[in-house]
Amino acid sequence: MVEQNPKEQLKGRASQLDPEIKARLLAEMAAPYRGFRKFIYFGCAASGFIGAFVFLSQIIAGRDVSTALPNFTLQLGVIALMAFLWQWEFHREQGKQRK
């Protein structure tokens, strides 16, 4: 019986993969942790929205405006950063699909 070398064995296994699974694995190789990054972006943006709501409520109530205003602007910055990163990720994904 003829033994195949390991490279030939891997090629044989790769051809046996379901095309859908193979496409998903290739996409994950091209952009690792994309889903995880989107989850983090969404979680941080949600946290920013909650924080902005709390600090906006404090500003409207006139309670500790001198400390609430910088915190409110920081929360808006977090929201803007997460929106920018989400859009950047989206455009990178669209660019790779066109190729």
Image: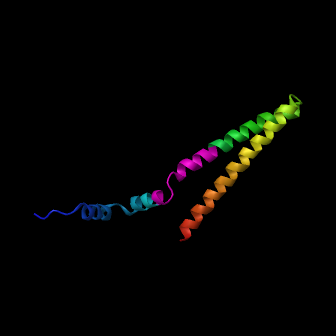
Residue 38 on the magenta span? yes
Q: Main secondary structure of the magenta part?
A: helix
Displayed quadrant of residue 8:
bottom left
Q: Which residue lies furthest to the bottom in this view?
A: 99
- Residue 90 appears at what percent x and percent y? 61, 59
Query: Residue visible at 87% across and 34% down?
Result: 60
Tell me how the rendering is colored. Answer: rainbow
Quadrant placement of the N terminus = bottom left
Q: In this view, does 75 lie above or below 84?
A: above
Query: Residue visible at 69% across and 52% down?
Result: 83
Query: Residue visible at 80% across and 34% down?
Result: 55
Tell me how many marks there are. Answer: 0
Q: In this view, does 10 lie above or below 77?
A: below
Query: Which residue is nearer to you in this view: 49 or 11?
Result: 11
- Residue 22 appears at what percent x and percent y? 39, 61
Residue 43 on the magenta span? no
Q: Is residue 28 above or below residue 59?
A: below
Left or right, residue 25 beside residue 41: left
Q: In this view, does 64 lie above or below 36?
A: above
Q: Which residue lies furthest to the right in this view?
A: 62
Q: Which residue lies furthest to the top in this view?
A: 63
- Residue 5 appears at what percent x and percent y? 21, 63
Range of magenta residues: 27-42
Query: Which residue is nearer to you in this view: 31 or 98?
Result: 31
Left or right, residue 99 beside residue 48: left
- Residue 44 appears at what percent x and percent y? 65, 42
Query: Residue visible at 67% across and 41% down?
Result: 46
Displayed quadrant of residue 26:
bottom left
Displayed quadrant of residue 62:
top right
